[in-house]
Amino acid sequence: MIAGSKRFWLLLHLAIPAIIVSCKPERDYWLMAKSEFSDKDYLGAIIELNCLLETDSLNDSALVLRAGSFHKIGKDEKALQDLKMAVEINPSNSQARLENARLIAADNPYSALLLLQGITEKTGRIASDALIEQGRIHYFADRFSESLNDFTAAIDADSSYALAWYYRGLMRSSFFDRDGSSGKKIFAFFDFDKSLCDFTKAVELQPDFADAWFQRAMVYFNMFDGVNGLKDANKAIALEPAYSYYYLGRAHYYRENAERTKALNDYNKAISLFDKDPNAYEERAVLYDSLGKTDLANKDRKTAFELKAQQEMDKKK
């Protein structure tokens, strides 16, 4: 592992592209960087990769790994610089193009789609990842049929990839309540039987995939199968007990089935984990109404209103 003195200098000079450390020629920086990245020691990985790139500045694989490390510590601008350089050095580096597309997709979806071209025609995991990203871009552009086709193609590219099955399951269970006269979405799949199959495949391939379990729980609830829905919701919470959203989903089921004490416990837990979600307070307010606790319900609605107002202010900054 990296010595403490080096880590101090990294923290001090993280804004500087070239971090001054004592690099030793005999050290296997690539192997060490991969090991530290795997151990989630992203700062250590960056130091190792800086040393490697001092002597091999055209190493596109090292640039991609350093970009991934920068992304993990919230330095996306630096990550993007590395990825652009990696693509310039080696335009056929599919991983560099994919990670570049992921970083720019929200602000520049067209350029992201151009970067994904060529990768999506391949097979295997990299092609599946590229098709998933393309499907996400199409989804946020309201091109839903194309998005569904992308996720199906991702499965065809790598049928052992749980994430591909998961995303198709999400699409198949999606619905929107908007209409054309208002310019809002008018799309719906709402195909619970098929989405159930997709989520089942996802958890079979990756049993620790908490959100796949949770999404299957939501499908079961919508199919009025509370027994299996609760089993899956409990499984998701067991896998990720610090994720507030899972408690909200289970609380909603409890509330709708008049299990008010359990519902309240879950709402309280969700809010204790994340107290900035206005939806949590609105949902708990509905429960308080059913319990005749009007003052508490009104207090929660007030909190929800204030949180929403703050969110709108934050968007304008």
Image: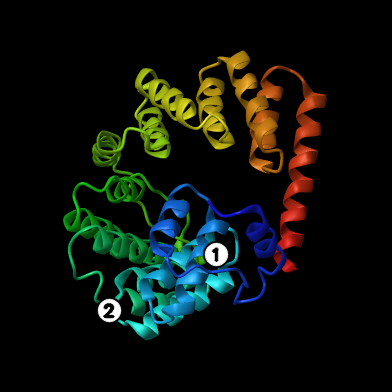
Q: Amino acid at mark 2?
A: Ser
Residue under the image location 53 percent in, 64 percent down:
46
| Horizontal relation, residue 248 to residue 282: left or right | left
| Horizontal relation, residue 290 to residue 255: left or right | right
Q: Quadrant of residue 85?
A: bottom left
Where is residue 191? Give x, y as percent. Answer: 29, 43
| SS category of the residue bearing label 2 | loop
Query: Are the two marked residues, 1 and 2, in contact with CB atoms closer than 8 angstroms?
Result: no
Q: Amino acid at mark 1?
A: Ile
- Above or below, 152 relative to 202: below
- Above or below, 257 relative to 82: above
| Horizontal relation, residue 42 to residue 202: left or right | right
| Horizontal relation, residue 39 to residue 13: left or right | left
> Which colour style is shown?
rainbow
Q: Which residue is mark 1?
A: 47
Q: Quadrant of the C terminus?
A: bottom right
In this view, the residue in front, 178 or 316, is 316
In this view, the residue in front, 210 or 173, is 210
- Above or below, 210 relative to 63: above
> Between disc 1 and disc 2, whose residue precedes?
1
How far is mark 1 from mark 2, CA to CA?
26 Å
Where is residue 119? Give x, y as percent. Answer: 25, 71
Residue under the image location 30 percent in, 75 percent down:
93
Where is residue 309? Give x, y as percent. Answer: 76, 54
Q: Quadrant of residue 25?
A: bottom left
Q: Which residue is mark 2?
A: 92
